[in-house]
Image (tube, helix red, strand yellow):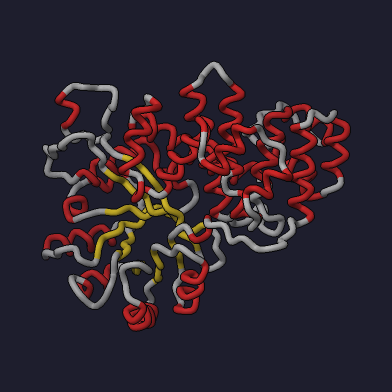
Amino acid sequence: MIDLSSNDPASKTLRVREFYLGRQPILDRNQALFGYELLFRNAPVGPAVIETELSATAAVIAHASQLGMEKTIGDALGFVNVDGDAILSDIFGFLPREKVVLEVTASLKTTPALLARMQELAGHGFRFALDDVRGDTGSLAELLPLAEYVKMSMRDASLDALLKLAPRFKQESKKLIAEKVENRDEFKTCLDLGFDYFQGYYFAKPVIMSGKKLSPSQLAVLELMTLVTSDADNAEIERAIKRDVSLALNLLRLVNTPAVGARQRIDSLSQAVTILGRRQLQRWLQIMLYAEPSKRGQNMSPLLMLATTRGRLLELLANKLRPSQRHVADTAFTVGIMSLMDTLFGIPMAEILAQIPVSDEVADALMYRGSFFGDLLKLAECIERIEDMDGYIIPTLRDLAVSTDELVELEMAAFEWSDNVVRYAI
Protein backbone atom coordinates (compact mmCIF):
# COMPACT_ATOMS: atom_id res chain seq x y z
CA MET A 1 0.00 0.00 0.00
CA ILE A 2 1.02 3.62 -0.16
CA ASP A 3 3.13 4.80 2.73
CA LEU A 4 1.88 8.35 3.25
CA SER A 5 5.02 9.25 5.16
CA SER A 6 7.25 8.61 2.16
CA ASN A 7 8.22 11.21 -0.48
CA ASP A 8 10.13 8.71 -2.60
CA PRO A 9 8.93 9.04 -6.23
CA ALA A 10 9.20 5.26 -6.55
CA SER A 11 6.41 4.97 -4.01
CA LYS A 12 3.99 6.21 -6.68
CA THR A 13 4.34 2.90 -8.48
CA LEU A 14 1.37 0.65 -7.74
CA ARG A 15 2.56 -2.20 -5.56
CA VAL A 16 0.77 -5.23 -4.20
CA ARG A 17 -0.10 -3.58 -0.90
CA GLU A 18 -1.54 -0.32 -2.27
CA PHE A 19 -5.15 -0.86 -1.28
CA TYR A 20 -7.91 -0.19 1.15
CA LEU A 21 -9.98 -3.02 2.50
CA GLY A 22 -13.63 -2.87 3.40
CA ARG A 23 -16.34 -5.43 3.92
CA GLN A 24 -20.08 -5.08 3.52
CA PRO A 25 -22.40 -7.57 5.25
CA ILE A 26 -24.72 -9.82 3.27
CA LEU A 27 -27.75 -10.92 5.32
CA ASP A 28 -30.31 -13.69 4.92
CA ARG A 29 -34.08 -13.30 5.02
CA ASN A 30 -34.00 -13.40 8.84
CA GLN A 31 -31.38 -10.61 8.83
CA ALA A 32 -28.73 -12.97 10.19
CA LEU A 33 -25.20 -12.66 8.84
CA PHE A 34 -24.57 -14.82 5.75
CA GLY A 35 -21.43 -13.37 4.19
CA TYR A 36 -19.36 -10.31 3.36
CA GLU A 37 -18.50 -8.69 0.09
CA LEU A 38 -14.82 -7.82 0.35
CA LEU A 39 -14.14 -4.46 -1.21
CA PHE A 40 -10.66 -3.55 -2.33
CA ARG A 41 -9.97 -0.05 -3.58
CA ASN A 42 -6.73 1.35 -4.95
CA ALA A 43 -6.29 4.88 -3.65
CA PRO A 44 -2.91 6.24 -4.75
CA VAL A 45 -1.95 9.76 -3.70
CA GLY A 46 -0.38 10.43 -7.08
CA PRO A 47 -0.51 8.82 -10.53
CA ALA A 48 -0.12 5.06 -10.38
CA VAL A 49 1.53 2.78 -12.89
CA ILE A 50 0.53 -0.87 -13.09
CA GLU A 51 3.65 -2.73 -14.12
CA THR A 52 2.34 -6.30 -14.19
CA GLU A 53 -0.20 -8.04 -16.37
CA LEU A 54 -1.99 -9.23 -13.28
CA SER A 55 -4.72 -6.75 -12.33
CA ALA A 56 -4.41 -4.67 -9.18
CA THR A 57 -7.48 -6.40 -7.78
CA ALA A 58 -5.89 -9.81 -8.18
CA ALA A 59 -2.67 -8.67 -6.51
CA VAL A 60 -4.66 -7.32 -3.60
CA ILE A 61 -6.57 -10.59 -3.20
CA ALA A 62 -3.30 -12.46 -3.02
CA HIS A 63 -1.99 -10.25 -0.27
CA ALA A 64 -5.21 -10.24 1.73
CA SER A 65 -5.27 -14.02 1.51
CA GLN A 66 -1.73 -14.21 2.79
CA LEU A 67 -2.70 -12.01 5.73
CA GLY A 68 -5.41 -14.52 6.49
CA MET A 69 -8.83 -14.66 4.85
CA GLU A 70 -10.23 -16.22 8.03
CA LYS A 71 -9.42 -13.00 9.88
CA THR A 72 -11.50 -11.04 7.41
CA ILE A 73 -14.62 -13.17 7.10
CA GLY A 74 -14.65 -15.46 10.15
CA ASP A 75 -17.33 -18.12 9.70
CA ALA A 76 -19.13 -16.24 6.91
CA LEU A 77 -18.73 -16.54 3.14
CA GLY A 78 -16.49 -14.03 1.37
CA PHE A 79 -17.63 -12.54 -1.94
CA VAL A 80 -14.55 -11.36 -3.84
CA ASN A 81 -14.66 -9.21 -6.98
CA VAL A 82 -12.56 -10.57 -9.82
CA ASP A 83 -12.04 -9.46 -13.40
CA GLY A 84 -10.92 -11.31 -16.51
CA ASP A 85 -7.23 -10.95 -15.70
CA ALA A 86 -7.75 -12.39 -12.24
CA ILE A 87 -9.78 -15.33 -13.55
CA LEU A 88 -7.05 -16.25 -16.04
CA SER A 89 -4.31 -15.94 -13.41
CA ASP A 90 -3.03 -18.54 -10.94
CA ILE A 91 -4.09 -16.50 -7.92
CA PHE A 92 -6.73 -18.95 -6.76
CA GLY A 93 -4.30 -21.09 -4.84
CA PHE A 94 -4.45 -18.36 -2.20
CA LEU A 95 -8.19 -18.60 -1.71
CA PRO A 96 -10.12 -21.14 0.41
CA ARG A 97 -12.60 -22.41 -2.18
CA GLU A 98 -15.16 -23.52 0.39
CA LYS A 99 -15.33 -20.01 1.89
CA VAL A 100 -15.10 -17.79 -1.19
CA VAL A 101 -17.55 -16.80 -3.94
CA LEU A 102 -15.95 -15.22 -7.01
CA GLU A 103 -17.94 -12.22 -8.19
CA VAL A 104 -17.89 -11.13 -11.85
CA THR A 105 -19.90 -8.39 -13.52
CA ALA A 106 -22.60 -9.19 -16.07
CA SER A 107 -20.80 -6.87 -18.51
CA LEU A 108 -17.60 -8.96 -18.45
CA LYS A 109 -16.38 -9.54 -21.99
CA THR A 110 -16.21 -13.27 -22.46
CA THR A 111 -13.85 -15.33 -24.60
CA PRO A 112 -13.67 -19.09 -25.07
CA ALA A 113 -10.53 -19.14 -22.90
CA LEU A 114 -12.23 -17.18 -20.12
CA LEU A 115 -15.32 -19.38 -20.09
CA ALA A 116 -13.17 -22.50 -20.11
CA ARG A 117 -11.18 -21.18 -17.13
CA MET A 118 -14.38 -20.44 -15.21
CA GLN A 119 -15.59 -23.98 -15.95
CA GLU A 120 -12.28 -25.30 -14.68
CA LEU A 121 -12.50 -23.30 -11.46
CA ALA A 122 -16.09 -24.44 -10.94
CA GLY A 123 -14.86 -28.00 -11.31
CA HIS A 124 -12.37 -27.33 -8.50
CA GLY A 125 -15.19 -26.22 -6.20
CA PHE A 126 -15.24 -22.46 -6.71
CA ARG A 127 -18.62 -20.74 -6.91
CA PHE A 128 -19.52 -17.65 -8.92
CA ALA A 129 -21.82 -14.69 -8.39
CA LEU A 130 -23.00 -12.57 -11.29
CA ASP A 131 -23.00 -8.92 -10.28
CA ASP A 132 -24.61 -5.76 -11.63
CA VAL A 133 -27.39 -7.57 -13.49
CA ARG A 134 -29.72 -4.90 -14.89
CA GLY A 135 -31.41 -6.73 -17.74
CA ASP A 136 -30.98 -9.43 -20.33
CA THR A 137 -27.89 -7.76 -21.80
CA GLY A 138 -24.14 -8.17 -22.17
CA SER A 139 -22.74 -11.62 -21.48
CA LEU A 140 -25.65 -12.70 -19.30
CA ALA A 141 -26.59 -15.74 -21.40
CA GLU A 142 -23.02 -17.11 -21.34
CA LEU A 143 -22.26 -16.33 -17.69
CA LEU A 144 -25.58 -17.22 -16.05
CA PRO A 145 -25.17 -21.03 -16.29
CA LEU A 146 -21.90 -20.72 -14.32
CA ALA A 147 -23.35 -18.56 -11.55
CA GLU A 148 -24.86 -19.79 -8.30
CA TYR A 149 -25.73 -16.26 -7.13
CA VAL A 150 -27.21 -13.31 -9.03
CA LYS A 151 -26.87 -9.79 -7.63
CA MET A 152 -29.21 -6.95 -8.57
CA SER A 153 -28.92 -3.40 -7.31
CA MET A 154 -31.79 -1.38 -5.88
CA ARG A 155 -30.09 1.70 -7.32
CA ASP A 156 -29.07 0.54 -10.78
CA ALA A 157 -31.80 -1.91 -11.81
CA SER A 158 -35.30 -0.56 -12.46
CA LEU A 159 -38.28 -1.95 -10.59
CA ASP A 160 -39.56 -3.31 -13.91
CA ALA A 161 -36.30 -5.21 -14.40
CA LEU A 162 -36.50 -6.59 -10.85
CA LEU A 163 -40.11 -7.71 -11.36
CA LYS A 164 -39.27 -9.35 -14.68
CA LEU A 165 -35.93 -10.98 -13.92
CA ALA A 166 -36.25 -12.10 -10.29
CA PRO A 167 -38.86 -14.80 -11.02
CA ARG A 168 -36.84 -16.00 -14.00
CA PHE A 169 -33.66 -16.39 -11.98
CA LYS A 170 -35.54 -18.12 -9.17
CA GLN A 171 -37.00 -20.56 -11.70
CA GLU A 172 -33.45 -21.33 -12.80
CA SER A 173 -32.52 -22.07 -9.15
CA LYS A 174 -30.30 -19.03 -8.75
CA LYS A 175 -29.88 -17.46 -5.31
CA LEU A 176 -30.78 -13.78 -5.50
CA ILE A 177 -28.86 -11.04 -3.68
CA ALA A 178 -30.29 -7.51 -3.50
CA GLU A 179 -27.55 -4.87 -3.37
CA LYS A 180 -27.60 -1.29 -2.09
CA VAL A 181 -30.60 -1.85 0.13
CA GLU A 182 -30.57 1.35 2.14
CA ASN A 183 -33.90 1.46 3.95
CA ARG A 184 -36.52 -0.84 5.44
CA ASP A 185 -39.03 -0.26 2.62
CA GLU A 186 -36.49 -1.48 0.05
CA PHE A 187 -35.76 -4.51 2.22
CA LYS A 188 -39.49 -5.31 2.35
CA THR A 189 -39.80 -4.93 -1.44
CA CYS A 190 -36.94 -7.36 -2.00
CA LEU A 191 -38.43 -9.82 0.48
CA ASP A 192 -41.71 -9.73 -1.44
CA LEU A 193 -39.85 -10.33 -4.71
CA GLY A 194 -38.29 -13.49 -3.29
CA PHE A 195 -34.70 -12.34 -2.84
CA ASP A 196 -32.64 -14.69 -0.67
CA TYR A 197 -29.96 -12.30 0.59
CA PHE A 198 -29.57 -8.59 1.14
CA GLN A 199 -26.60 -6.23 1.04
CA GLY A 200 -26.62 -2.62 2.20
CA TYR A 201 -26.69 -0.56 5.36
CA TYR A 202 -30.44 -0.46 5.96
CA PHE A 203 -29.87 -2.49 9.15
CA ALA A 204 -27.47 0.12 10.56
CA LYS A 205 -29.75 3.13 10.09
CA PRO A 206 -31.76 4.05 13.17
CA VAL A 207 -35.51 3.72 12.90
CA ILE A 208 -36.63 6.16 15.58
CA MET A 209 -39.87 5.12 17.25
CA SER A 210 -41.72 7.58 19.43
CA GLY A 211 -42.26 6.33 22.97
CA LYS A 212 -40.31 3.11 22.47
CA LYS A 213 -39.18 1.52 25.73
CA LEU A 214 -36.15 -0.65 26.33
CA SER A 215 -36.68 -4.36 26.98
CA PRO A 216 -36.22 -5.73 30.52
CA SER A 217 -32.99 -7.40 29.39
CA GLN A 218 -31.61 -4.16 27.96
CA LEU A 219 -32.58 -2.28 31.12
CA ALA A 220 -30.77 -4.89 33.21
CA VAL A 221 -27.59 -4.43 31.19
CA LEU A 222 -27.82 -0.63 31.40
CA GLU A 223 -28.32 -0.84 35.17
CA LEU A 224 -25.20 -2.98 35.45
CA MET A 225 -23.22 -0.59 33.24
CA THR A 226 -24.21 2.27 35.53
CA LEU A 227 -23.09 0.30 38.59
CA VAL A 228 -19.74 -0.52 36.99
CA THR A 229 -19.02 3.04 35.84
CA SER A 230 -20.05 4.47 39.24
CA ASP A 231 -17.59 2.20 41.10
CA ALA A 232 -20.21 0.22 43.00
CA ASP A 233 -18.75 -2.62 45.07
CA ASN A 234 -18.55 -6.15 43.71
CA ALA A 235 -21.31 -7.47 45.97
CA GLU A 236 -23.80 -4.96 44.57
CA ILE A 237 -22.77 -5.80 41.00
CA GLU A 238 -23.10 -9.50 41.73
CA ARG A 239 -26.63 -9.02 43.12
CA ALA A 240 -27.65 -7.13 39.97
CA ILE A 241 -26.30 -9.88 37.72
CA LYS A 242 -28.20 -12.54 39.66
CA ARG A 243 -31.48 -10.76 38.94
CA ASP A 244 -31.08 -11.63 35.23
CA VAL A 245 -30.49 -15.36 34.73
CA SER A 246 -29.43 -14.90 31.10
CA LEU A 247 -26.74 -12.39 32.07
CA ALA A 248 -25.47 -14.62 34.85
CA LEU A 249 -25.16 -17.65 32.59
CA ASN A 250 -23.44 -15.69 29.85
CA LEU A 251 -20.97 -14.14 32.30
CA LEU A 252 -19.99 -17.59 33.59
CA ARG A 253 -19.67 -18.79 30.00
CA LEU A 254 -17.47 -15.82 29.13
CA VAL A 255 -14.96 -16.29 31.96
CA ASN A 256 -14.54 -19.94 31.00
CA THR A 257 -13.62 -19.22 27.37
CA PRO A 258 -10.07 -19.32 25.98
CA ALA A 259 -10.16 -15.55 25.50
CA VAL A 260 -10.15 -14.94 29.28
CA GLY A 261 -7.56 -17.61 30.03
CA ALA A 262 -8.66 -18.69 33.51
CA ARG A 263 -6.48 -21.56 34.76
CA GLN A 264 -9.37 -23.43 36.36
CA ARG A 265 -13.11 -23.53 35.82
CA ILE A 266 -15.00 -20.60 37.34
CA ASP A 267 -18.41 -21.52 38.78
CA SER A 268 -19.34 -18.54 40.95
CA LEU A 269 -20.40 -15.03 39.91
CA SER A 270 -18.20 -13.54 42.61
CA GLN A 271 -15.12 -15.16 41.10
CA ALA A 272 -16.25 -14.20 37.60
CA VAL A 273 -16.60 -10.50 38.47
CA THR A 274 -13.21 -10.49 40.22
CA ILE A 275 -11.36 -12.29 37.42
CA LEU A 276 -12.89 -10.27 34.63
CA GLY A 277 -12.22 -6.89 36.22
CA ARG A 278 -14.14 -3.65 35.85
CA ARG A 279 -12.76 -2.66 32.46
CA GLN A 280 -13.53 -6.00 30.81
CA LEU A 281 -16.88 -6.27 32.57
CA GLN A 282 -17.96 -2.90 31.20
CA ARG A 283 -16.82 -3.91 27.71
CA TRP A 284 -18.73 -7.19 27.90
CA LEU A 285 -21.89 -5.40 29.00
CA GLN A 286 -21.63 -2.95 26.11
CA ILE A 287 -21.39 -5.87 23.70
CA MET A 288 -24.22 -7.78 25.38
CA LEU A 289 -26.64 -4.99 24.55
CA TYR A 290 -26.38 -6.01 20.90
CA ALA A 291 -27.01 -9.70 21.52
CA GLU A 292 -30.75 -10.28 21.61
CA PRO A 293 -31.65 -12.82 24.32
CA SER A 294 -33.55 -14.97 21.81
CA LYS A 295 -30.56 -15.14 19.49
CA ARG A 296 -27.63 -15.58 21.87
CA GLY A 297 -25.54 -18.55 20.82
CA GLN A 298 -27.23 -18.61 17.40
CA ASN A 299 -26.80 -16.48 14.30
CA MET A 300 -25.78 -13.07 15.54
CA SER A 301 -27.12 -9.85 14.13
CA PRO A 302 -24.90 -7.89 11.73
CA LEU A 303 -25.31 -4.92 14.07
CA LEU A 304 -23.40 -6.86 16.74
CA MET A 305 -20.59 -7.63 14.29
CA LEU A 306 -20.47 -4.03 13.08
CA ALA A 307 -20.47 -2.56 16.59
CA THR A 308 -17.75 -4.86 17.94
CA THR A 309 -15.57 -4.35 14.85
CA ARG A 310 -16.01 -0.59 15.01
CA GLY A 311 -15.27 -0.46 18.74
CA ARG A 312 -12.14 -2.57 18.40
CA LEU A 313 -10.84 -0.58 15.41
CA LEU A 314 -11.25 2.69 17.30
CA GLU A 315 -9.48 1.17 20.30
CA LEU A 316 -6.56 -0.03 18.19
CA LEU A 317 -6.24 3.32 16.43
CA ALA A 318 -6.31 5.20 19.74
CA ASN A 319 -3.76 2.84 21.26
CA LYS A 320 -1.43 3.40 18.31
CA LEU A 321 -1.82 7.17 18.37
CA ARG A 322 -1.63 7.57 22.15
CA PRO A 323 0.12 4.41 23.37
CA SER A 324 0.88 5.64 26.87
CA GLN A 325 -2.76 6.56 27.67
CA ARG A 326 -4.71 3.34 28.33
CA HIS A 327 -7.89 5.23 29.22
CA VAL A 328 -7.94 6.85 25.77
CA ALA A 329 -8.12 3.46 24.07
CA ASP A 330 -10.89 2.36 26.47
CA THR A 331 -12.86 5.52 25.70
CA ALA A 332 -12.41 4.99 21.96
CA PHE A 333 -13.84 1.48 22.28
CA THR A 334 -16.84 2.85 24.16
CA VAL A 335 -17.46 5.48 21.47
CA GLY A 336 -17.35 2.83 18.75
CA ILE A 337 -19.73 0.48 20.56
CA MET A 338 -22.17 3.21 21.59
CA SER A 339 -22.27 4.82 18.14
CA LEU A 340 -24.85 2.26 16.97
CA MET A 341 -27.06 2.24 20.05
CA ASP A 342 -29.60 4.61 18.50
CA THR A 343 -30.09 1.99 15.79
CA LEU A 344 -30.17 -0.82 18.33
CA PHE A 345 -32.79 0.80 20.56
CA GLY A 346 -34.67 2.88 17.98
CA ILE A 347 -34.23 5.85 20.34
CA PRO A 348 -32.47 9.17 19.57
CA MET A 349 -28.86 9.29 20.76
CA ALA A 350 -29.62 12.27 23.01
CA GLU A 351 -32.14 10.17 24.97
CA ILE A 352 -29.66 7.29 25.28
CA LEU A 353 -26.98 9.61 26.64
CA ALA A 354 -29.47 10.87 29.22
CA GLN A 355 -29.67 7.30 30.57
CA ILE A 356 -25.99 6.31 30.33
CA PRO A 357 -23.44 8.57 32.04
CA VAL A 358 -20.61 9.48 29.65
CA SER A 359 -17.99 12.22 29.52
CA ASP A 360 -18.53 15.42 27.53
CA GLU A 361 -15.89 14.24 25.05
CA VAL A 362 -17.73 10.97 24.39
CA ALA A 363 -21.06 12.76 24.07
CA ASP A 364 -19.54 15.23 21.59
CA ALA A 365 -18.19 12.37 19.49
CA LEU A 366 -21.50 10.47 19.49
CA MET A 367 -23.75 13.46 18.86
CA TYR A 368 -21.63 15.63 16.56
CA ARG A 369 -18.57 13.53 15.56
CA GLY A 370 -16.48 16.12 17.37
CA SER A 371 -13.16 15.82 19.21
CA PHE A 372 -10.39 13.27 18.72
CA PHE A 373 -12.84 10.40 19.22
CA GLY A 374 -15.26 11.86 16.70
CA ASP A 375 -12.47 11.95 14.10
CA LEU A 376 -11.77 8.26 14.71
CA LEU A 377 -15.47 7.44 14.46
CA LYS A 378 -15.86 9.29 11.15
CA LEU A 379 -12.84 7.42 9.81
CA ALA A 380 -14.37 4.06 10.78
CA GLU A 381 -17.68 4.99 9.17
CA CYS A 382 -15.90 5.94 5.94
CA ILE A 383 -14.09 2.60 5.89
CA GLU A 384 -17.40 0.76 6.30
CA ARG A 385 -18.92 2.69 3.38
CA ILE A 386 -15.88 2.43 1.21
CA GLU A 387 -17.47 4.16 -1.80
CA ASP A 388 -17.67 7.42 0.19
CA MET A 389 -14.16 7.39 1.58
CA ASP A 390 -11.87 8.79 -1.10
CA GLY A 391 -12.34 12.47 -0.31
CA TYR A 392 -11.94 12.05 3.44
CA ILE A 393 -9.79 9.13 4.37
CA ILE A 394 -6.42 10.16 2.91
CA PRO A 395 -6.38 13.63 4.53
CA THR A 396 -7.52 12.11 7.82
CA LEU A 397 -4.79 9.48 7.74
CA ARG A 398 -2.24 12.21 7.04
CA ASP A 399 -3.51 14.21 10.01
CA LEU A 400 -3.34 11.15 12.25
CA ALA A 401 0.08 10.09 10.86
CA VAL A 402 -1.25 6.60 10.07
CA SER A 403 -0.22 4.87 6.84
CA THR A 404 -2.67 2.87 4.78
CA ASP A 405 -0.49 -0.17 5.45
CA GLU A 406 -0.99 0.26 9.19
CA LEU A 407 -4.71 0.91 8.75
CA VAL A 408 -5.32 -2.39 6.97
CA GLU A 409 -3.34 -4.32 9.58
CA LEU A 410 -5.53 -2.77 12.28
CA GLU A 411 -8.68 -3.55 10.28
CA MET A 412 -7.70 -7.20 9.98
CA ALA A 413 -7.04 -7.38 13.72
CA ALA A 414 -10.44 -5.78 14.43
CA PHE A 415 -12.24 -8.23 12.13
CA GLU A 416 -10.59 -11.20 13.83
CA TRP A 417 -11.30 -9.91 17.35
CA SER A 418 -14.95 -9.24 16.54
CA ASP A 419 -15.40 -12.74 15.14
CA ASN A 420 -13.84 -14.27 18.28
CA VAL A 421 -16.04 -12.21 20.58
CA VAL A 422 -19.20 -13.33 18.84
CA ARG A 423 -18.03 -16.94 18.72
CA TYR A 424 -16.84 -17.27 22.32
CA ALA A 425 -18.14 -14.49 24.51
CA ILE A 426 -21.86 -14.24 23.72
Q: Quadrant of residue 46?
A: top left
Position in image of residue 107 (x %, y %): 20, 66
Side (left or right) of 211 relative to 135:
right
At 36% from the left and 55% from the top, the residue drawn is: 79
Q: Is residue 388 above or below residue 103?
A: above
Q: Tell me where residue 32 appears, x and y as whole percent.
A: 55, 60
Residue toward you, 209 or 304: 209
Residue 139 position in % (x across, y down): 18, 70
Q: Tell which of 278 and 85 is nearer to you.
A: 278
| Residue 301 visible in image | yes
Quarter assignment of residue 176: bottom left
Question: How many marks on residues?
Answer: 0
| Residue ID at (24%, 67%) | 106
In this view of the protein, which residue sits in the foreground, 223 or 74?
Answer: 223
Q: Is residue 416 visible?
A: no
Residue 226, given in percent of the width and then of the height, sits at 77, 38
Which residue: 15% across, 25% down?
9
On the rendered structure, is 76 left or right of 232?
left
Q: Residue at x 28, y 27 (%)?
A: 3
Above or below, comparing residue 69 to residue 275 in the picture: below
Residue 263 vs residue 289, the one in the foreground: 289
Q: Is residue 137 above or below residue 7?
A: below
Q: Determine the residue located farthest toward the top in the rendered image.
A: 324
Please state, as top left, top right, bottom left or bottom right, where the N terminus lies in the image. top left
